[in-house]
Image (spheres, rainbow, N blue to C red):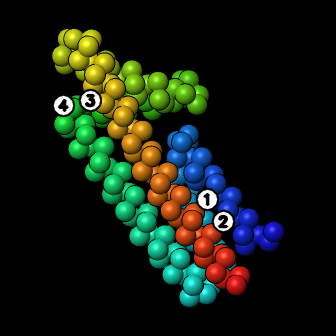
Amino acid sequence: MEASLWVPALLILVGMVGIVLPMVPGLLLVVAGVLVWALDTGTPLAWTVFAVTVVLWAAGFGLRYAVPERRLRAAGVRRSTLVLAVLLGLVGFFVVPVVGGALGFVLGVYLVELGHSRSSREAWSSTRSALGAVFTSMGIDLLAALAIATTWVAGVLLSRA
């Protein structure tokens, strides 16, 4: 396999892993993989594939924030709760490698909501809603990445035909 295919494929794969294990900017790496291929190939088909990729990225980016935020508002989770939980997640990322970010986020949501409501049941309900929003966001990113990868594979196959 030539470098013009395996380098973009590797970027796309690492980007998808980065969506699930948020250590790298996942969806951006997927788009970068297609960009590398389009730059190397340089055909109108390659640039069309890249343009479709950018549209898919923009749609995924917009949905990643719109859908979970609507669910969180419906569940009564405050924006300030999420900001504090993300900060605690960042601290957790450095204190406990790999899983610390997720643990810090969950603990942050729970503690902030416990402080607001003084009820562990309500705090846990808000925490579950926040986790559902995070998983929804990751799912949207993964679907966008899969759509981009599928578009890229179709472009590669069409360029070889």
Alpha carbon separation for disc pair 3 and 1: 33 Å
Image position of 147 (left or right of 62): right
Image position of 136 (left or right of 151): left
Q: Earlier in the sequence, mark 3 or mark 2?
A: 2
Q: Earlier in the sequence, mark 3 or mark 1?
A: 1
- For the N terminus, the image quarter is bottom right
Q: Secondary structure at mark 2?
A: helix
Please tell me whether mark 4 or mark 3 is closer to you in this view: 4
Q: Quadrant of residue 152?
A: bottom right
Q: Earlier in the sequence, mark 2 or mark 4?
A: 2
Alpha carbon separation for disc pair 1 and 2: 6 Å
Say which mark, if any, is on residue 127: none
Q: Residues within 10 Å of mark 4 (few under 14, many from 20)?
A: few
Q: Residues within 10 Å of mark 2 (few under 14, many from 20)?
A: many
Disc 1 residue type? Answer: Ile
Say which mark, if any, is on residue 12: 1
Q: Which residue is mark 3?
A: 81
